[in-house]
Amino acid sequence: MAMNAVGSSGGGGRRSRRKPVMAEINVTPMVDVMLVLLIIFMVSAPLLTVGVPLDLPQTQAKSLDQQDKTPLQLSVDISGKVFINDTEVAFPELVPKLKAITDQRGTGADERIFMRADKKADYGTVAKVMGLLSGAGFKRLALVTEVERGS
């Protein structure tokens, strides 16, 4: 009788049993989300690097050590249009915009400018752009090419 009195709570002798708290972490949903994000970034990453579409000439030159985080790129496409990074610029506005950008960065005329030109672009246009840069005091001009593929 003493046993019933201690074990019962007045509800006819039933004991309420709670399930123990689960202390394990279910990582399956997290792995699923991470795999989906990985696929999304793998697909979208090549789309982010598209700038001005150019067919660069191929050379055997070594690549330059890139110290700047975001290099200043000047591009000339096949139709002769000039771009600063991805923004089209008219010839009269080229030097003032470049000076404004380099002054804002604090480098001035010492900034290295990476020049990309389509291999089928007019040589006169490319020479004109290089002449404008040289006349404006920009002396650190690097020509961007692709690595030559085996023949």
Image (tube, rainbow, N blue to C red):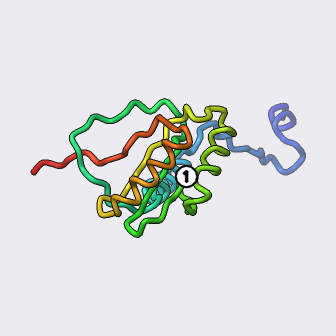
**What residue do we see at 44% from left, 33% from top?**
66
When asked about the image quadrant of residue 70, the answer is top right
**What residue do we see at 63% from left, 44% from top?**
99
Q: Is residue 3 above or below residue 16?
A: above
- Is residue 62 or residue 42 the one in the foreground? 62
- x and y percentages locating residue 32 in the rendered image: 50, 53
| 146 sits to left or right of 114 | left
- Is residue 75 or residue 123 the one in the foreground? 123
- Is residue 43 or residue 92 the one in the foreground? 92
**Residue under label 1:** 29
Which of the image's four quarters has the N terminus?
top right
- x and y percentages locating residue 86 in the rendered image: 53, 58
User: Of all residues shown, which one is farthest toward the front?
Assistant: 135
**What residue do we see at 51% from left, 41% from top?**
71
- x and y percentages locating residue 136 in the rendered image: 56, 43
Amino acid carrying mark 1 in the image: Pro
- Is residue 41 or residue 138 the one in the foreground? 138
User: Of all residues shown, which one is farthest toward the left?
Assistant: 151
- x and y percentages locating residue 26 in the rendered image: 56, 45
What SS does tag 1 mark? Answer: helix
User: Of all residues shown, which one is farthest toward the bottom?
Assistant: 79
- Label 1 Cα neighbours within 10 Å, binned few <14 / some 14-19 / many ≥20: few
**What residue do we see at 47% from left, 58% from top?**
51
When asked about the image quadrant of residue 59, the answer is top left
